[in-house]
Amino acid sequence: MPFDMPAKFPLGRRNLLKTLASAGILGMLSPITEKAEAQVASATRGVPVPKIKDISVIETAPQGSRLTVVKITTDQPGLYGYGCATFTQRADLVKPAVERYLKPLLMNKPTNRIEDIWWTCYDSSYWRNGPVLNNAISGVDQALWDIKGRLAGMSVYDLVGGKCREAVDTYAHADGQEYEQVIAAAKQYIAQGWRHVRVQVGLPGMAGYGAQHGAAQETFKPLTNAPLFEPTYQFRRAIKLLEIARTELGEEVELLHDMHERLTPNLAVEFCKQAEKFRMYFLEDPLSPEDLGYFKQIRQNCATPIAMGELFNSPHEWSPLIDEQLIDYIRCHLSQVGGFTPARKISLLAENYGVRTAWHGPGDVSPIGHTAHCHLDLVSHNFGIQEYTPFNDRTQEVFQGCPQMKDGYLWVSEKPGWGMEIDEKLAAKFPFTNPVNGLNGGWGELRTLDGTVIKQ
Ligand code: GCO
Ligand code: MG
């Protein structure tokens, strides 16, 4: 019989469905749906979507570096999450960015809408892609992933697709004032199971990156009292180090080196050419973000693998390098790019262009941040290598459930979310202190012999 809805049911289809449902007619027609709904309700325990009840900031320095972590508390008792928002050089600015700007914006929002919240935070300052705000957003973003994981009873790596490898391969830091010290440190790491070692040697009389050296030599006669650095000097020491390392450590070990964006662009091109014969795993940050145009010259001149990106804040920086295939590894600082959500997108973009990941993992990332790296490393098919920095005992007491190191691999806790808890009372016993230079964790100056200030 034709069904003339407008005539018989002037209030429309919605009311018709309501009537049928209350008479039990629809229910009777779909037992499969009913059963499925009951199963989902029991699997999810029928928990309503949690809402953001409070956002606070934990500041602690158990290992010296100023670590900032955002805690989001929900309206459901016992459900909260942690996210890394660490920016040591301007640490005091992140807390107000979270508490005075993001907190009022996000109170009572549903915690399940991570993507929506990320964009809300990102767009709300109008001016964006700056390190303070990106770190603040990262703290919120990672805390929301932690909450989602705790709620689901799953690790974050499970939520975003599941492990595609067993553990996270890492590189260790072999540093020394002189070549023989670097080689001795590298040999120790190799004996402990590492297959990848980053080598850095000091510059006598200068402030080299990765390994400091003694007082300025008389022969330099600098026109400044500030710490010194000369790019050509660094160039020669680093090339020599790679040569010695390849001879002394053999063919098998994977060698890495961090240029820390300190050479002039043309010197960086020349360095990559000369380093080609040492078959590096990668050369890290050869150019500064201001000189990205020179990556084409590096590519056109040699096959030294290039890793880049710890200073990046903006998609305008990483996107062209990835889609023009000018680098081999993208190694952004997760909290600087705005957290886990954007980093996952960077990794997927990179996967499409044959670029692998090597997230920045220094001491000035909190263990929550290091754990977020590891979860991303575990789920990304295009993972390359993870920078490793050991956690001291104090740090592991404050941050319980830190990834564990074995034979050069990091293993994460399998508990829900990030699988970590923070002893907040203990964390408060290691407050930020102002060091002797009075710069609140900020970096001072670095100058060339004639007194010109240069990038660090
Ligand atoms: C690295 C980095 C760090 C940075 C530090 C800045 O490759 O690990 O270059 O050592 O210098 O994170 O605060
Ligand atoms: Mg670096």
Image (spheres, helix red, strand yellow):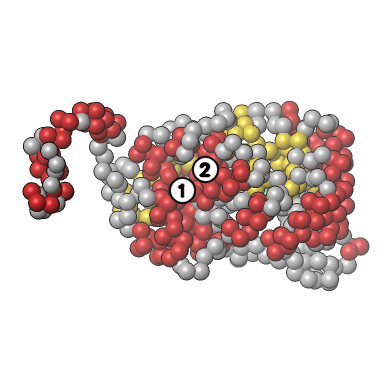
Q: Nearer the viewer, residue 213 or 277?
A: 277
Q: Residue furthest front?
A: 1
Q: Position of residue 232 (x, y in %)?
A: 86, 58
Q: Secondary structure at mark 1?
A: helix
Q: Nearer the N terminus, badge 2 or badge 1?
A: 1
Whether residue 145 appears in this view of the structure is yes
Q: Residue at x 13, y 48 (%)?
A: 5
Which amino acid type is shown beneath numbered disc 2?
Ala
Q: To which quarter of the image does residue 386 belong?
A: top right
Q: Position of residue 27 (x, y in %)?
A: 16, 33
Q: Secondary structure at mark 2?
A: helix
Whether residue 434 appears in this view of the structure is no
Q: Residue at x 41, y 34 (%)?
A: 154
Q: Nearer the viewer, residue 18 or 243?
A: 18
Q: Position of residue 231 (x, y in %)?
A: 82, 59
- According to the picture, the residue beneath numbered tag 2 turns out to be 372
Q: To which quarter of the image does residue 384 belong?
A: top right
Which amino acid type is shown beneath numbered disc 1?
Gln
Q: Position of residue 272 (x, y in %)?
A: 82, 50
Badge 2 vs badge 1, beta-carbon distance below 8 Å? yes
- According to the picture, the residue beneath numbered tag 1 turns out to be 142
